[in-house]
Image (cartoon, rainbow, N blue to C red):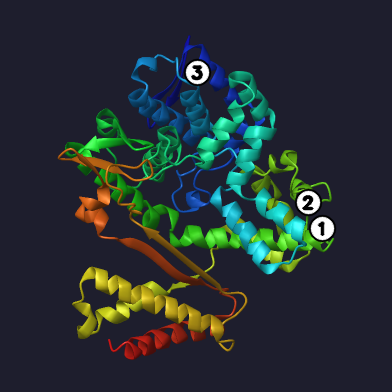
Amino acid sequence: MNKVIKDPIHEFIDFNGPRENELKKLLSDPYFQRLRRVKQLGFSDYVFPSAAHSRFAHSLGVYKIAKRMLMIIEPEEATGKWSPKAEACLAAALLHDVGHGMFSHAFEKAMEFFLARNTLEGQRAKSFATAVDHEAVGRRIITDSSIGGALANFGGPHFPGMVRDIIKKKDKNCVYTSIVSSQLDADRLDYAKRDAYFAGVSSGGIDLDWLLRNFKQGQNGDAHFLYVDSKAYISLEQFTVTLFQLYPTIYLHKKTRGLEFMFAQLLSRVFQMIASDDVTSTGLSENHPFVRFFREPDNLDHASLLDDTLFWGSLHQFREATDTSVSDIATRLSDRRILPMIDIWKVADEVLALRSTTSALPAISRVALIEGICVAVAKKLQEDSSIWSDSYYYDTYNRPIYKPKGIIGGDPQQINVSVGGQILDIASISPVVASAASFNIHRIYYDDQNILKADILKSAIKALIEAELKDRGS
């Protein structure tokens, strides 16, 4: 008994034999179906119109890759008769994103924004923070919901805990854990291909089939892991570079980040007013899912309603809100009038390019200099009340190309390559990966209604960059 789902990235998602088809029933659970209504890339389709694929489709892709990786560990079971640990791995691959809220990571950012600006009582603050942490919510769904019941029926009372622990990375020496969560896992292998495909961008690509054909199983003490011989290491290098380049291209795109900030502003204001018992001014009713979620954040039934469609369906209500902050941001979002921003990094880069003393610096030294300048400038700006405004938002993020562990002999949480019979971290043999390259953003978003303030901000940034360069003797 085999069933197949068509997919543009992997062609087919196969469920072979009675056990895999029993797992397939998880797809019909309401908690999993909700992932159809959560976009994988949040607001990215405002920038890349076709990037509207769902967490549902991504989760199926992760399942497909995880299954192919498991065939290396349990080749004799490839027909669908897996060990209990392998079955838990497959279930974890399907369910690894089941706790995501609306617009994926953007929802967590919005709630961090609210909690940083509003004081809640101890236990309530903890409950609210947990309720918007997709990993914590996912663990609860896996053990305490209808999905937990289905998993227990499938593999026994301890099976939901096995699935949860794989996603949680409880045993970092476990090869089954590394398939779902590591620096070379099924999750990354799927979204690196899927996100680039649907966004319509080209970032080098990943030779996924070649990689999967060349994986081998290794052991180093108690640690079990996958590795490749040196002949396939270029494909691994290509994977790390491709994933790295997707950050400036897609994930950290300036307009996407601006939209996420506006979304955070809006929800933070809405929750602030709900907390003040002023629901009416938000444009919502007392029975609205946002209100119910805020009142009872521990209730999984309320959390299950928080998907993208809830927000878009509520946007016209927010536009009609009597609170001007809510209505203004909602209108801007619906009209795609994204807040403007100043890129401190870009300004610093341009200033350095005009200086003979710094224009010839090696790339690593130049990047380190710009990073230090940006951090110092942002700090001084926020400390100067004559320049800084509460309406400004400083957006910063650092994404390294790779996080080396450097364990000789191999480790499940590093990318392993065999060279001359010795298994090494890829950073030990790849000059590209070992370069310690990172992509950094230092941006300030501001309200364009106050042009004078914006002009002062722009002038201050350039002046501070010049002063910082002078202090550093550059």
Looking at marks 3 and 1 on the same chain, the residue that comes earlier in the sequence is marked by 3
Residue under the point 27% across and 42% down: 409
Q: Secondary structure at mark 2?
A: helix
The C terminus sits in image quarter: bottom left
Distance of label 3 from label 1 (alpha carbons): 46 Å
Residue found at the very far top of the displayed protein: 1
Between disc 3 and disc 1, the foreground one is 3
Between disc 1 and disc 2, the foreground one is 2
Between disc 2 and disc 3, the foreground one is 3
What residue is shown with label 1? 279
Could one spot residue 331 in this view of the protein?
no
**Residue 392 spot, x, y in % from top left:** 57, 74
Could one spot residue 354 in this view of the protein?
yes
The picture quadrant where one finds residue 224 is top left
**The disc label shown at residue 156, or none:** none
Q: Given contact means CB atoms under 8 Å apart, are the residues at marks 2 and 3 in contact?
A: no
Q: Nearer the viewer, residue 468 or 250?
A: 468
